[in-house]
Image (cartoon, rainbow, N blue to C red):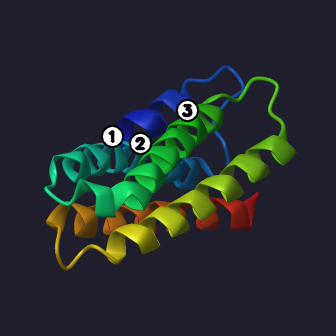
């Protein structure tokens, strides 16, 4: 996936970006996280103790939405607004941190939560790495 994102970025009429690889890794991490969080929320809904997982489900769905939005914002370069990009990356990192912590608290009982927590941590890291160079 990262290769395709990098290739697409390089085809932009404005040319390749200095941080193209970091950008591609972040977009891929956001897309992976959005999928993992959506799947985790769905798996939580199938658990017998679903009422105990309400916060986890809510965090999963919020994180999935923020990650998907972040991937789309990062994929658009025309009319680039650095302040908006930084704000979206910061929000994504925070959503991933919150969701990852909540999922980790259920990771011993639910493997899907454990996997989701790991993916959230990777996405948070990718967002922070990109923020550091913007």
The residue depicted at 35 percent of the width and 62 percent of the height is 119
The residue depicted at 70 percent of the width and 61 percent of the height is 131
Give coordinates of residue 84: x percent, y percent.
80, 42
- Residue wearing tag 2: 31
Q: CA distance from mark 1 to mark 3?
A: 12 Å
Do the numbered discs 2 and 3 sit on residues whose CB atoms are within 8 Å? no
Give coordinates of residue 31: x percent, y percent.
41, 42
Can the viewer see residue 30 in this picture? no
**Label 2: few (<14), some or many (≥20) within 10 Å?**
many
| Residue extending furthest toward the top | 13
Depth check: give the residue in front, 132 or 41.
Answer: 41
The residue depicted at 53 percent of the width and 67 percent of the height is 98
Give coordinates of residue 77: x percent, y percent.
70, 29
Nearer-N-terminus badge (1/2): 1
- Residue wearing tag 1: 1
- Residue wearing tag 3: 9
The residue depicted at 16 percent of the width and 54 percent of the height is 47
Mark 3 element type: helix
**Label 1: few (<14), some or many (≥20) within 10 Å?**
few
Relative to residue 55, is residue 81 depicted above or below?
Answer: above
Image position of 60 (left or right of 81): left
Image position of 101 (left or right of 92): left
Nearer-N-terminus badge (2/3): 3
């Amino acid at each position: 996936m990262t290769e395709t994102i990098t290739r697409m970025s390089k085809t932009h009429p404005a040319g390749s970006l200095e941080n193209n690889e970091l950008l591609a890794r972040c977009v891929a991490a956001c897309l992976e996280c959005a999928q993992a969080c959506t799947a985790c929320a769905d798996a939580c809904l199938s658990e017998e103790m679903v009422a105990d997982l309400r916060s986890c489900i809510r965090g999963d769905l919020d994180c999935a939405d923020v990650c998907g939005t972040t991937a789309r914002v990062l994929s658009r370069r025309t009319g680039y607004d650095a302040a908006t990009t930084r704000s979206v990356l910061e929000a994504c990192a925070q959503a991933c941190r919150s969701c990852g912590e909540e999922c980790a608290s259920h990771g011993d009982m639910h493997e899907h939560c454990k996997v989701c927590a790991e993916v959230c941590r990777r996405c948070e890291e990718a967002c922070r790495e990109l923020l550091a160079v913007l």
